[in-house]
Image (cartoon, helix red, strand yellow):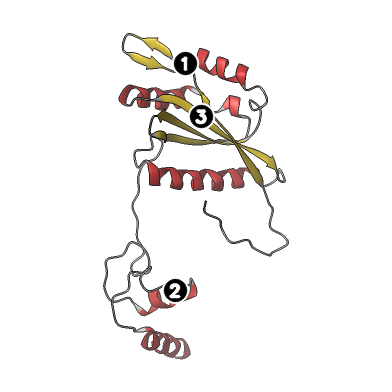
Amino acid sequence: MRNWPRNSNSDIQMYEFTVHGPYSVAVTVLPHGRQIDVGSAEQFWATQPDLADAVGCYVFGLKTGGGITPWYVGKSGTGFRHECFQSHKLQHYNETLMRHVGTPVVFLIRKESGPPGSLESCLHRVEEYLIAEALHHNPELTNIQRVEWSIRGIYHSSRGRQSGDALLLSRALGLASSDAHVANGDASDDALTAHESSQST
């Protein structure tokens, strides 16, 4: 489990979520394969009435003997019943069922406490966190278009001499030289001197 450092700022608004599931999702067996449909959704919420109108994030996955693989991550600020089984979500789920084996399951991550004013922003951050973690386990997550990025001298950068500005930023962020992909040889003193000189002119 990964934890972000707590901020002591008294203005921080704290939200707490709890995990519920995994819950199996009923499927209809058709000549061309399995399918999750409107009837599946109705059956699901009939067995989980206490969660139907809760808000939070959710993870759709397939359960096999090897565990559960996440395939879709979403969020709902209006109630899970209004989001989890929308038609375009069903398309993602059913495409996954056509290509992969396993029992479809859903985790519901319900908001338990927190002010309503910043809920949408909080849900977005929780969803982004869950997506990032799910991608580590399954790079083929269906609702994500992979975008690779780098910051030269800081993140996912080819090894080489770091620019002075990049080195100063990596210092400010507390990054070790290996984390920032810095080549052997410390140019930090030269970089700091050059930066300070440029600021004084």
Please tell me the numbered disc located at residue 112: none
Q: Position of residue 183 (x, y in %)?
A: 28, 75
Please, what is the three-letter code of the amino acid marked with disc 3? Val
Q: Which mark is residue 169?
A: 2
The part of the image, by quadrant, that contains residue 165 is bottom left
Nearest the viewer among 141 and 146 is 141
Name the residue rendered at 52%, 51% in the picture.
1
* Residue highlighted by disc 3: 106
- Residue 81 lies, with reference to residue 46, above or below; the image says below
Callout 3: helix, strand or loop? strand
What secondary structure is found at the residue carrying circle 2? helix
Residue 5 image offset from top left, x and y in percent:
58, 61
Q: Earlier in the sequence, mark 3 or mark 2?
A: 3
| Residue to which mark 1 is pinned | 37
Front one among 172 and 198: 172
Q: Quadrant of the image for the C terminus?
A: bottom left
Asked which quadrant contains residue 50, the reply is top right
Count neighbours of disc 1 (C-alpha within 10 A) and say few if under 14, some if 14 to 19, many if 20 or more: some
How many residues crowd mark 2 within 10 Å: few (<14), some (14–19), many (20+)? some
Residue 152 spot, x, y in % from top left: 33, 67
Q: Amino acid at mark 2?
A: Leu
Measured in 3D between alpha carbons, the distance from the residue under mark 1 to the one under mark 2, in whole angstroms, is 51 Å
Camera-near label (3 vs 2) is: 3
In this rendering, is residue 189 above or below 162? below
Estimate the spatial distance between the alpha carbons at disc 1 and disc 3, rounded to whole Å.
15 Å
Q: Which callout, 1 or 3, points at the residue further toward the start of the chain?
A: 1
Q: Is residue 10 left or right of residue 86?
A: right
Nearest to viewer (mark 1 / mark 2): 1
What residue sits 43% from the left and 73% below the top? 170
> What is the C-alpha distance between the residues marked 3 and 2?
41 Å
- The reply to whether dot 1 and dot 3 touch (C-beta < 8 Å) is no
Which residue appears farthest toward the top when viewing the image? 31
